[in-house]
Image (cartoon, rainbow, N blue to C red):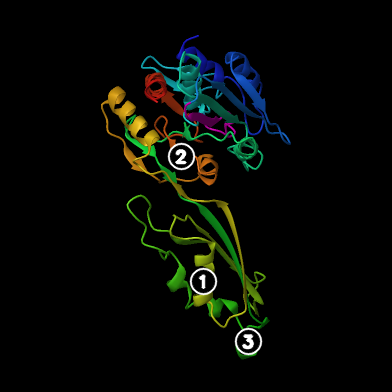
Amino acid sequence: MTIKELFIKLLKFKSITPNDDGAMEFIKKYLSDFEIIEINKEDVKNLFIYKKFGEGEHLCFAGHIDVVPAGEGWDSEPFEPKITKDGTIFARGSQDMKSGVAAFLYAVKHTSSFNGTLSLLLTSDEEGDAKYGTVEVLTHLKTQKFLPDYAIVAEPTCEEKFGDAIKIGRRGSINGVLILNGVQGHAAYPEKSINPINLIAPILPKIAGINLDNGDEYFSPSKFVITDIRAGMEVTNVTPSSLKMMFNVRNNTHTNKEKIEKFVAENFKNLDYKLTLSQSAKPFITNPNTKIVKLIDSSIQNITKITPKHSTAGGTSDARFFGEFKVKTIEFGVINDTIHAPNEYTKIEYVEKLTKIFKEVIISF
């Protein structure tokens, strides 16, 4: 089976979160000479596949087999890959991220020697809540003292040309809900009420879109982004008793929940409010001088003749869980410009080159 045939096979699985549609069974058979750990919880399927070649370090390739629903607006069947004459392949998951999964599956299967442990971590719940996916496997591996030393998550990372960007970290994500209390009253008698809209009006310029830090050479500043404000009963003659504001902070390593709490307290001083914060992802950074960064940089340069930039931009991925477990982690995959969109596509050429890059990393490791 060629890499192209393997890629097409994976694309045909209608693996919409958390259903794997049989993909995991296929992968188990494809790597039948590897050891297998299955951790299934609720409706989520997780596979950890490994082989110990020697006593050296542990390198893990990771990714997700699940995809988002196809949605409307496709020019072809989303789960029947369409290939054009120039090698463009249209299918749901072609970028995000069955291209990456196909590449590391093929690279690992065709590895005959390695000075250490080579593994793969796959989940069917990355596009969903990710509550029972990658984090469950890493938690288990930690109890077994079997966490990888390094990880490559094959998410699509390139921006304009294949090979132009890797991710060496990710921002975190902190969600906030603030309830600002007032006193309800008749709009004709504003002196008898405390309107929370009036209370927040002079505060908004001080918080909306404000940078909470200056960022650094790897991260942009953590910005306080207000996403929703609502109050009242949708009538014109009653002032509201309270106001609800929602916000999000894509935080770097310089800002945390405690810093946000302090920022809010300073701006809402002497007011009656309640703040609730939740963190869905924590930021992480892998030192550019780390072995895995140098190896992937070198391999990309050898195969594509491009020097990739080191990025931390974008949303979250399962790389965040590896970061929490102190695994030195990078992300690299095909161009990211049609993920989750109708007519998602990539090029067979990119998948073939991605496979060569992963194979070279394994050989050089």
SS at badge 2: strand
Instruction: Classify 10 Å Cα crowding around label 1: few (below 14), some (14-19), many (20 and above).
Output: few
SS at badge 1: helix
Q: Report, in whole angstroms, how far the alpha carbon at label 1 lies from the one at label 2.
A: 31 Å
| Residue 159 in sight here | no
* Residue 336 pos. (x, y %): 42, 35
Q: Which is more N-terminal, label 1 or label 3?
A: 3
The one nearer the camera, 346 or 65, is 65
The residue that mark 2 highlights is: 328
The residue that mark 3 highlights is: 188
Circle 2: residue type: Lys
Point 50% across, 51% down: residue: 172
Q: Which is more N-terminal, label 2 or label 1?
A: 1
Q: Report, in whole angstroms, how far the alpha carbon at label 2 lies from the one at label 3.
A: 62 Å
Residue 262's disc is 1
**From the viewer's perspective, is the residue at label 1 or at label 2 nearer?**
2
Instruction: Classify 10 Å Cα crowding around label 2: few (below 14), some (14-19), many (20 and above).
Output: many
**From the viewer's perspective, is the residue at label 3 or at label 1 nearer?**
1
Height in image: 332 above or below 358? below
* Residue 182 pos. (x, y %): 64, 80
Magenta segment's dominant SS is loop
Q: How many marks?
A: 3
Circle 3: residue type: Ala
